[in-house]
Amino acid sequence: MLLDAAAVAASGTILSRQHLIAESGDASLHLQYLAQALALSQPLLFTDHVRWARDKAEARQIPSMELHARLERLGEALKTSLPAGEAATARSYLQEGLALLESSASMPASFVDQEQPLGLLLQDYLKAMLAGDRQGASTMILDAVARGVSVKEIYLKVFQPCQWEIGRLWQMNQISMAQEHYCTAATQLIMSQLYPHMFGVERVGKTLVATSIAGDLHEIGVRMVVDIFELNGWDTYYLGSNTPAASIIESICQEGANVLAISVTLTLYLGAVQDLIQRVRADPRCAAVKIVVGGYPFNLVPNLWQQIGADGCAQDAAQAVELGNRLLTQ
Ligand code: B12
């Protein structure tokens, strides 16, 4: 398989040549993105990464020539380490990436829009977070819920865009990594404060097991998915991130799961999602479980979930519940 060839190139041929590593800096990261894109024949998975790297570098006044040179060197290395046909495909993906570098970086658009429902609350919440006022942020949210705003709305219209925005501000070098971590930890704390509103809903007799794919530390998105299922009467069993495949399979069996939800944020781990799905499918005890996937790469490339072998995919936590219910009635 092409992924194997590229991965072998990554882990073996290319990376074993120390002079190439030394010369190419973080080229191995670009190579891993390229390998995922090639394995799935989805050039967008690579060009999106190049766009992200370009915008992040420009925000830090790093000339795009550096990224350009790294991608060029990667292309040269692949020429000799991949069979000719595969090297040509890899070269065409790299060319698309290089073409992007010809255009100047664009500031990704803000996720905060006052005009949207709960837009003002979102704006104030973000402001409090960036000022290090998690107590104020918490009070705002608890007051809104007391006024009748639903937990679902708070999740999807405040927490989600706030998290996306702090990611954007970090990428644009406008806030520090420490601020990003502070906001994330504070939002997780405030999510926990909403739990008294979550349980006690009438049960519907369906069970969800959910996880982030191993290696990918982003788990707030899947936690939101789990909480919204719980709000809809499902019994949920949330594994966080980095759970080994064998333990996930045991949880599916022990909990009698109807649906397994797998989240991935970094494109790098798409191969791992595919492997996990194959392992679940190969276990006869899991024959009835439906597998749904979601997260950044699936929102970027609409048909990716089918290629990966899942039963369905949803863009956000609310749509995830609709999908889960639909799959069980089919
Ligand atoms: C918080 C955060 C972290 C935290 C995560 C902590 C935690 N406990 O989760 C930490 C600090 C660990 C982290 C690390 C890194 N991060 Co980070 N991180 C973020 C940030 C700011 C927020 C993530 C989040 O909470 N999103 C909010 C949730 C609600 O949104 P969501 O995940 O999209 O989920 C919704 C839908 O996608 C969907 N969904 C999600 N999962 C599922 C599953 C199913 C089954 C379904 C149906 C639906 C579904 O429903 C969810 C709810 O509606 C994002 C910014 C962003 N745009 O997301 C960057 C971001 C994802 N990180 C990024 C990067 C680069 C990294 C690092 C590589 C940085 C580094 N150099 O160390 C590392 C990688 C570490 C690793 N191995 O995973 C980049 C990724 C760029 C890219 N396109 O690849 C982003 C986009 C920031 C940016 N703008 O540059 N990060």
Image: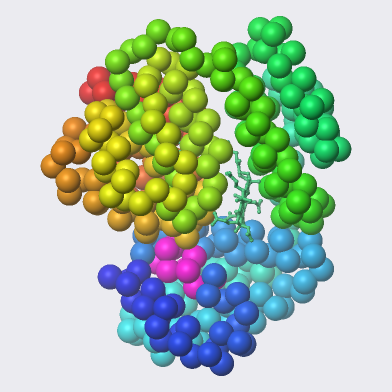
- Please say which color scheme the image uses: rainbow
State whether the magenta stretch is mostly helix, strand or loop.
Answer: helix
Q: Position of residue 107 (x, y in %)?
A: 75, 52
Q: Could you say which quadrant of the image residue 114 lies in? A: top right
- The structure residue drawn at horizontal position 33% and vertical position 36%, both measured from the top left corner, is 260
Q: Choose between 246 and 15: the one closer to the eye.
A: 246
Whether residue 316 is visible to the viewer of this picture, yes or no, is no
Number of marks in the rendered image = 0
Q: Position of residue 68 (x, y in %)?
A: 65, 77
Tell me if residue 274 is in the magenta stretch.
Answer: no
Q: Is residue 82 left or right of residue 154?
A: left
- The structure residue drawn at horizontal position 72% and vertical position 47%, both measured from the top left corner, is 180
Q: Could you say which quadrant of the image residue 263 lies in? A: top left
- The structure residue drawn at horizontal position 68% and vertical position 65%, both measured from the top left corner, is 54
Tell me if residue 36 is in the magenta stretch.
Answer: yes
Q: Choose between 260 and 72: the one closer to the eye.
A: 260
The single residue placed furthest to the left in the displayed view is 284
Q: Is residue 312 left or right of residue 76?
A: left
- The structure residue drawn at horizontal position 67% and vertical position 39%, both measured from the top left corner, is 185
Q: Is residue 135 above or below residue 63?
A: above
The image quadrant where one finds the N terminus is: bottom left
Q: Position of residue 177 (x, y in %)?
A: 74, 54
The image quadrant where one finds the C terminus is: top left
The single residue placed furthest to the right in the displayed view is 131
In the image, the segment drawn in magenta is 30-38
Q: Is residue 214 left or right of residue 196?
A: left
Q: Position of residue 299 (x, y in %)?
A: 50, 43
